Structure formats: structure tokens, C-alpha cells
Amino acid sequence: MTEGDDDTTTTEYRQFRFELPPGATDVILVRHGESAPARLDTPAPRVDGRSDPALDPQGRKEADLVGERLKDEDAAAIYVTSLRRTHETAAPLAARLGLEPVVEPRLSEVYLGEWDGPVFRKNFAEGHPIALQAIAQERWDAIPGAETTEEFQGRIRAALVDIAAAHPDQRVVVVTHGGVIGAIVAMATGARPWAFVGADNASLSHLVITDDRWIIRRFNDTGHLGTDLDHPVQPLT
């Protein structure tokens, strides 16, 4: 083209659409369905020192809706924790996909020390001074004997690194807990420790793990739950 000529060719540049980076792992995080109400007179059994309630009837409905929402996902694996509320939440999806869930205990809920179980819900509901301190400081270990933020985040990170190493270029579903999902999103974004605590029961969050970073694609997606389920104020874990 010589000086003075008009360039009539127009190049268009479309908006960027996210693509999974080569070697990355696509992780769909599912918070378990609503668990049975806590009672001081009949506490749930314990696993690894943690309270282990089953899902209540609403939680089972939520689990089925999760299974329906994710039934067409090309998931290579389903991971659950050592606590049965994650097993029961994963069961409808596992049946639809023909997968046997893999237990990853390092993704179990934060250990709450002397308060693990119904005492935790009671003390937070009633505004116990230590509960208020934990909220203000955003540290679980304000509770006597509870896991520190560093311990909690460390085991979660190690578990996800191992899952990613086992599933490059694949999608996996991880059914876990509200505190765990909050910690994952906080670590990925550099946010405050409790900035994302409070994912709804049976909600979906979405994490992409690459060799050098974690990418959050969505948080607390509840579109599959509709409006026919009762959704009370969510406890922290």
C-alpha cells in the first residue's frame, strides 16, 4: 500500500473467551446439602474428631438437584471427604455418572476443637464472646483447640495440588464443606480468610488449577436449586 491509499480491510477482535490452559485441572466445588439440625442432647457421631451428621430431608433433595445439574459434565472423578454429608450429597451424581467417589480426608471441614459439634452452632447462634472474637479476627483458632488458619489452608492446598497432579486436562467434582470452599476462594484471590465463608448448601463454585496459579470462575452458584426449597440462614460450616 502506498502513501495516500485507503486501507479498507477491517480486522475484528472478538471478546476473550476463557479456555482451560494446557495441563490445567477444572474443579467444580460442591458444598454438601443441608445436614441434620444439631442437638445437644443427641449429638451426631464423630469421625476423626469431627461431628458427622447425615443430611436432613432438605439436604437429600438438594443432593438430587446437584446430581441433575451436573449429570452432563464430563467429570473424570468425584472426590468426597471423610464425612458422610459429602458422601450422601455426591451419591446421586455418582450414580448418574457411574463413578465411585474417592475419599480425600484433607478436604474435611475445619477442626473446631472443644466446640466441634452442636456446641459450635449453639455458641455462634447465641453470640458467645469467643464466637464474636473468632468473627472479628477471622480465625478459627480463637475457639479453644481449633485448627489454625495456616494448618487449615495448608492441608487444603496440599490436597488440591495432588488432585490436580492426578487430573491434568480433566474436570473433577469435589464435594466438600463451606469452610473449605471459603478457604479455597480466599487463597485463590488473596482475600481475607473469611471473605468467602458462607457458601450455600448444595451450591457450586468453580476453580481452575494451573502450575502457577488458581483461577476462580464462579462462587456460590445456586441456579439449580430453584425457589421451592426452604433456604434458612446458613451456618458457617
Image: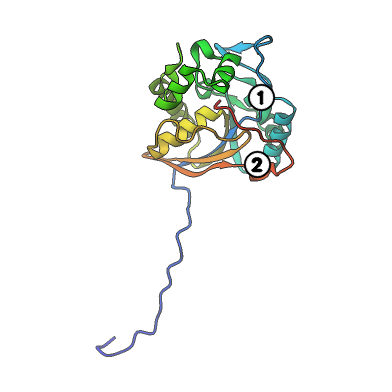
Quadrant hosting residue 47: top right
Q: What's the distance in space between the residues labelled 1 and 2, CA to CA?
A: 21 Å
Amino acid of disc 2? Leu
Q: Is 45 or 105 nearer to us in this picture?
A: 45
- The residue lying at 50 percent from left, 28 percent from top is 180
Q: Is residue 47 above or below residue 201?
A: above
Q: Is 194 or 214 nearer to us in this picture?
A: 194
Q: Is 149 or 27 nearer to us in this picture?
A: 149
* The N terminus sits in image quarter: bottom left
Percent across and percent down for residue 126 are 56, 20
**Is there any visible trace of residue 165 in the rendered image?**
no
Label 1 belongs to which residue?
35
Q: Is residue 206 above or below residue 163?
A: below
Disc 1 residue crowd, few under 14, some 14–19, many 20+, Cα 10 Å: many
Q: Secondary structure at mark 1?
A: loop
Label 2 belongs to which residue?
70
Q: Earlier in the sequence, mark 1 or mark 2?
A: 1
Percent across and percent down for residue 170 are 53, 41
Quadrant hosting residue 91: top right
- The residue lying at 41 percent from left, 30 percent from top is 193
Percent across and percent down for residue 229 are 72, 38
